[in-house]
Image (cartoon, helix red, strand yellow):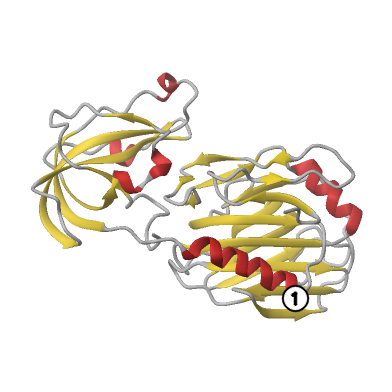
């Protein structure tokens, strides 16, 4: 059904992410994001972020106009931090253009969340004051709702109210053109590592009941998920597939290369046999992943892998395989940045 005041909605990269047309007519619109740097999409089509970001496509002007009209804002997201040592604050959901200028930011400072909101009272960086709340755990998902109307800010974690504050005052008359993005600052110097999904931005204040209902909706969505078997092993590299020149990928910005390994020592899980094929990201954002390209046959590496068949999000990605033994079981490397501590 229609949700009033929704300006941006991105559930995951497999959903329609559609904002229904308003009752007064007008077309519905689809919200899309583009992964840049080392960002890509995970098993649940969620954003996997580390040394990269996801940009909201064409949402900036609409978001600015909608929030300046109401002077109200709600930001909702389901986030899984890769660690609780990152700071800066690391940018999770941000509508900003550099470390010193924003309309709003949801970020992480060690095991706490921060929220910055620009008003004539809080300044161009939204730090005077910033709101600090919560306790995050590495690899553990938290559902967050932050909602504001002039003079009242509330924050909810997993449906429970953790902040009710009058410290932030003022409207959005001093908001300016900014960029909506996820996992970093626009200037690429406030990187966040973790997984992100279920992002919604509203241009209205949500009541207690609504905030709790948003959490229940999220909880129902993730309740069906089952973890998959993971194998962590010390492996010897036997064969590589050359990483393609990114210019040959045409419309694709990412590509997987398949390497063949011999399992030397199982550290966790069960190996399917003595040898296996592993798909690694060889190209991300039209750039070669050097750590993968530089591996040489004969090298020993520790790998964390899951069966390729357990990763439906990879079906549409380009895959290159020059290995001779094509009938070996195929796995996917989940030890790349951003995957650690998250399943």
Quadrant for the C terminus, please.
bottom left
Q: Where does residue 319 sit, x and y in percent of width and height?
A: 33, 30
Which residue is pictured at 82% across the width and 61% down the height?
204
Query: In the figure, 147 relative to 288: above or below?
Result: below
Quadrant for the N terminus, please.
bottom right
Judged from the image, the secondary structure of the residue bearing numbered disc 1 is helix
Q: Where does residue 294 sit, x and y in percent of width and height?
A: 26, 37
Of 310 and 104, nearer the camera is 310
Residue 128 shown left or right of residue 17 in the figure: right
Q: Where does residue 167 sit, x and y in percent of width and height?
A: 81, 77
**Residue at which label 1 appears:** 208
Q: Is residue 192 visible?
A: no
Residue 9 shown left or right of residue 292 in the figure: right
Residue 175 shown left or right of residue 89 in the figure: right
Q: Where does residue 113 sit, x and y in percent of width and height?
A: 61, 70
Q: How many marks?
A: 1
Of 214 and 96, nearer the camera is 214
Please, which residue is most extreme toward the front here?
Answer: 1
Query: In the figure, 339 relative to 218: above or below?
Result: above
Which residue is pictured at 83% across the width and 46% down the height?
22
Which residue is pictured at 21% across the width and 26% down the height?
322
Query: In the figure, 155 relative to 313: above or below?
Result: below
Of 60 and 107, nearer the camera is 60
Of 101 and 167, nearer the camera is 167
Residue 248 shown left or right of residue 258 in the figure: right
Q: Is residue 242 visible?
A: yes
Residue 261, picture quadrant: top left
Label 1 neighbourhood size at 10 Å, few (<14), some (14-19), many (20+)?
some
């Amino acid at each position: 059904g229609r949700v009033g005041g929704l300006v941006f909605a991105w559930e995951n990269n497999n959903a329609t992410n559609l904002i229904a047309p308003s009752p007064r007519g007008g077309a519905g619109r689809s919200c899309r994001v583009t992964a840049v740097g080392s960002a890509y999409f995970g098993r649940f089509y969620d954003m996997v972020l580390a040394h990269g970001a996801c940009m909201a496509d064409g949402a900036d002007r609409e978001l600015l106009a909608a929030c300046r009209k109401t002077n109200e804002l709600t930001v909702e997201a389901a986030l899984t931090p890769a660690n609780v040592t990152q700071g800066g604050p690391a940018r999770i959901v941000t509508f900003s253009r550099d470390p010193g200028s924003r309309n709003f930011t949801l970020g992480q400072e060690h095991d706490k969340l921060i929220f910055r909101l620009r008003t004539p009272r809080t300044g161009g960086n939204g730090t005077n004051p910033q709101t600090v709340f919560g306790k995050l755990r590495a690899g553990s998902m938290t559902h967050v709702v932050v909602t504001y109307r002039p003079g009242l800010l509330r924050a909810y974690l997993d449906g429970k109210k953790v902040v009710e504050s009058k410290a932030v005052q003022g409207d959005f008359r001093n908001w300016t053109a900014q960029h909506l993005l996820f996992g970093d600052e626009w200037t690429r110097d406030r990187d966040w590592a973790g997984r992100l999904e279920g992002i919604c931005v509203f241009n209205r204040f949500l009541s207690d009941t609504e905030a709790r209902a948003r959490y229940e909706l999220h909880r129902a969505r993730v309740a069906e998920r089952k973890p998959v078997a993971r194998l962590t092993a010390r492996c010897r590299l036997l064969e590589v597939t050359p990483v393609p020149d990114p210019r040959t990928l045409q419309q694709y910005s990412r590509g997987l290369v398949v390497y063949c390994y011999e399992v030397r020592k199982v550290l966790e899980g069960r190996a399917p046999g003595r040898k296996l094929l592993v798909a690694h990201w060889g190209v991300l954002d039209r750039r070669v992943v050097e750590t993968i390209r530089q591996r040489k046959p004969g090298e020993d590496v520790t790998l964390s892998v899951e069966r390729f068949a357990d990763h439906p999000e990879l079906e549409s990605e380009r895959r290159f395989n020059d290995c001779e033994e094509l009938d070996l079981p195929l796995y996917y490397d989940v030890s790349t940045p951003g995957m650690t501590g998250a399943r």
